[in-house]
Image (cartoon, grey):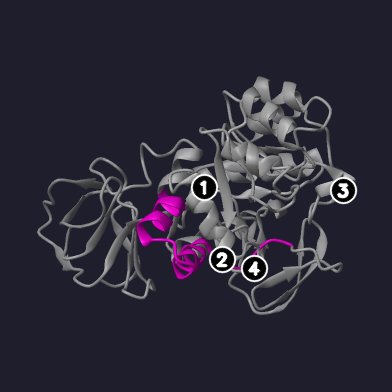
Amino acid sequence: MRLTGAKVFDVQNGFVSRDVCIEGELLADHSSDGKSADLSGYYLIPGLTDVHFHGAKGHDFSDADPEGLQVMADYELSRGVTQICPAGMTLLEEQLIKVCKNAAQHRKNSKSGALLCGVNLEGPFLSRAKKGAQNGDWLHEPDVAMLRRLEEASEGLVKLVSVAPEEPGALEFIKEVADEVTVSIAHTTADYDTAMAAYAAGARQATHLFNAMPPFTHRAPGVVGAAFDTPECMAELICDGVHIHASVVRAVFQLFGSKRVILISDTMRAAGMPDGDYTLGGQPVQVKGKYATLEDGTLAGSVTDLMNCMKTAVSFGIPLEDAVRAAAVNPAKAIGIYSRVGSIENGKLANLAVLDENLELKAVFLKGELVHGTV
């Protein structure tokens, strides 16, 4: 199929006018089937990659439920997210093993939905003082052997692991595993020096920047300052209009640059569902509008999918090409799948999203097939 007339996202040049050809599952310089679609007036962008979300449509990755994971994957695809790296919570190892095994089975058996490209272990190697919506009873000191067992259970799908670097053994843990997975600093009381030591040890990401970490102040820049001072570090940002003020979103893009920001949704099971009572990591959560909170008012993840987070970033003044980079290019790079997805380049999978001038999702392609909407 040949797609014509669209404003096409280009990694080097922003949006350009050119045809895009699909040959089989891949993007190519020609199309042999003779089909074409006129996308004049639309944007054509790479399918998004969400490297940090917990659930949707009433299901949670931590449930380790095959049917639930399939529902989540189908929902994400319907929202233009063509690659997912769902996140587990702080759980007992027994349950995390089940979560990882479920992911591995889904990867092998699923016939539909967003492509599961990794597993994100947000817990349990976190700080009790900054546990947020994580269950403090199940926190665990950083443990290389435990991570190895989880990697084995996932059949190599663990791509991200969060760590509070001030915890006993954390720096040694980071040095040991940094060549195998992306280590992200999270749920931490670390000061600037401790965070810098973690980045020197091999950490390369900051989990949901500003949330569950010390504030960024002029005399104590903390994790945020350390992440900024580490050029290789990428920073996750929840841009749902609740977790981060619009001014701070603009500041982060200015400080870090669009190549270092990763937009994430951090959605929990209430995403795509009505207001009401839900759970996250075994704890009760109340959802009202865009807010999901624990009983004490602590924010408990988001209910805004990644495509709408990207749209929110644009409404805050972030240029569309920068927002697309942060939601498609950078997350794919963070989990090592950019050679196959994340940009509109020949030889990559034809995983694409079509947006109208108001950035409403109109169509989704997965492996060259139109799976949602019309063109």
Residue type of the residue flagged with mark 4: Val
**Which mark, residue 242?**
4
User: How busy is the neighbourhood of tag 4: few (under 14 within 10 Å), some, or many (20 plus)?
Assistant: some
**In what element is the residue under mark 2?**
helix
User: How busy is the neighbourhood of tag 1: few (under 14 within 10 Å), some, or many (20 plus)?
Assistant: few
Residue 330: x percent and y percent?
45, 45
Please report contact status of discs 3 and 2: CB closer than 8 Å, yes or no. no
Residue 54: x percent and y percent?
65, 56
**Which mark, residue 136?**
3
User: How busy is the neighbourhood of tag 2: few (under 14 within 10 Å), some, or many (20 plus)?
Assistant: some
Quadrant housing the C terminus: bottom left
Please report contact status of discs 3 and 1: CB closer than 8 Å, yes or no. no
Q: Which of marks 1 and 4 is nearer the N terminus?
A: 4
User: How busy is the neighbourhood of tag 3: few (under 14 within 10 Å), some, or many (20 plus)?
Assistant: some
- The residue labelled by disc 2 is 246
In the image, the segment drawn in magenta is 300-328
Q: Is residue 327 left or right of residue 249?
A: left
Q: Is residue 94 visible?
A: yes
**In what element is the residue under mark 4?**
loop
